């Protein structure tokens, strides 16, 4: 999730260089080439059932294709730190969906961790005060406000897609290995993006793109389509989806940090407290109960 947050933030400069749907198509295409060897079915895996094929398509549509489109459009209309604020809703969405669709028991500590994560990023949102500041600017402020709100709604839609991706991915890990899930989901995503991607590519001036942007695109494609998905699906194979959802707090934290460190956005003292609350949620979700009680007693 820290890797996801990093490429979410770095997608902003890429969205300035490429049309969003062309960027998505290039991402999935590079990922497909990198994962050709992962498409082969291992000997120990059963043939894909119809239900598994449907889940793969749904995961590609929601968790890869729509998440990518909503996220890139949302970040391009707002900022990396705003993406961090809005995507703090992911842990709560994952916990709720895992309870509704997977019938997983969501324990008190997990809910406390989710609350701690959301509280931390809400505190970050209140301390940033981006939208009130825009309201007192020039006559263009109203249009800017509308653009900001549209971007935030798109980021919220991306958060819901990411939550569904985690829950569906948990189902897929019961019958498929993480590498094959990663490759098949990316291949479906490439197919979904191809009609728009080809149309945009035919009229795009690729020679105008500088080599640092191509390097960033390569990192983005491999991180988004290959590395982060494989790591996430590997983890989902052994961790309940409701508990894994709390780790998604690292997405907004890392996105905001990249916004500050790499994109020049400011961070105040209260925002450091917000990050501390978010990281405390990970400890609540992952440390065994006995270890937590010993830590509380200072042993």
Image: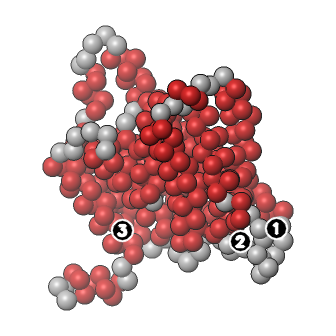
- Seen at 18% across and 45% down, the residue is 268
Question: Which residue was labeled with disc 2?
Answer: 176
Q: Residue 150 at what x, y percent from top left?
A: 47, 29
Q: In which image quadrant can residue 176 be found? A: bottom right
Give the residue furthest to the top.
139
Which element is circle 2 on?
loop
Q: Quadrant of the C terminus?
A: bottom left
Per the image, label 3 sits on a secondary structure element best described as helix
Marks 2,1: beta carbons within 8 A: yes
Asked if residue 160 can be seen in this view, the reply is no
Q: Which of labels 3 and 2 is toward the front?
A: 2
Give the label, 3 or 1, closer to the camera: 1
Measuring from the top left, give residue 280's x and y in whole percent: 29, 67
In three-dimensional space, the C-alpha distance between marks 3 and 1, rounded to whole angstroms, equals 35 Å
Label 1 sits on residue: 48
Q: Dot 3 surroundings within 10 Å: few (below 14), some, or many (20 or more)? A: many
| Helix, strand or loop status at disc 1 | loop
Along the line of sight, which residue is nearer the eye, 258 or 89? 258
Q: Which mark is residue 282?
A: 3
Question: Where 175 sits versus 165, above or below?
Answer: below
Residue 257 shown left or right of residue 249 in the figure? left
Q: Residue at x 54, y 61 (%)?
A: 227
Q: Is residue 289 above or below residue 104?
A: below
């Amino acid at each position: 999730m820290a890797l996801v947050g990093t490429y979410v933030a770095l997608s902003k400069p890429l969205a300035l260089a490429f049309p969003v749907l062309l960027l998505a198509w290039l991402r999935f295409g590079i990922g497909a080439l990198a994962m050709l060897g992962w498409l082969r079915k291992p000997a120990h895996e059963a043939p894909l059932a119809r239900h598994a094929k449907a889940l793969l398509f749904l995961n590609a549509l929601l968790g890869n294709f729509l998440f990518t489109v909503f996220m890139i459009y949302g970040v391009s209309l707002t900022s990396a730190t705003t993406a961090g604020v809005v995507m703090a809703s992911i842990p709560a969405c994952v916990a709720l969906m895992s309870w509704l669709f997977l019938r997983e028991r969501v324990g008190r500590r997990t809910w406390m961790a989710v609350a701690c994560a959301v509280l931390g990023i809400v505190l970050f949102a209140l301390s940033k005060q981006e939208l009130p500041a825009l309201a007192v600017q020039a006559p263009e402020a109203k249009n800017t406000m509308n653009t900001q709100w549209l971007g935030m709604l798109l980021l919220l839609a991306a958060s819901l897609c990411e939550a569904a991706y985690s829950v569906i991915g948990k189902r897929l890990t019961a019958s498929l290995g993480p590498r094959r899930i990663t490759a098949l989901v990316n291949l479906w995503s490439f197919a979904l993006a191809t009609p728009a991607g080809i149309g945009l590519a035919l009229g795009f001036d690729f020679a105008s793109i500088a080599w640092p942007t191509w390097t960033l695109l390569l990192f983005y494609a491999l991180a988004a389509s290959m590395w982060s998905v494989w790591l996430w699906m590997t983890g989902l194979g052994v961790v309940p989806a409701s508990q894994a959802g709390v780790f998604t707090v690292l997405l907004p934290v890392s996105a905001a940090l990249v916004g500050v460190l790499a994109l020049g956005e400011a961070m105040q003292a209260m925002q450091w407290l917000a990050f501390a609350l978010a990281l405390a949620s990970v400890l609540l979700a992952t440390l065994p109960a006995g270890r937590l009680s010993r830590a509380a007693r200072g042993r």
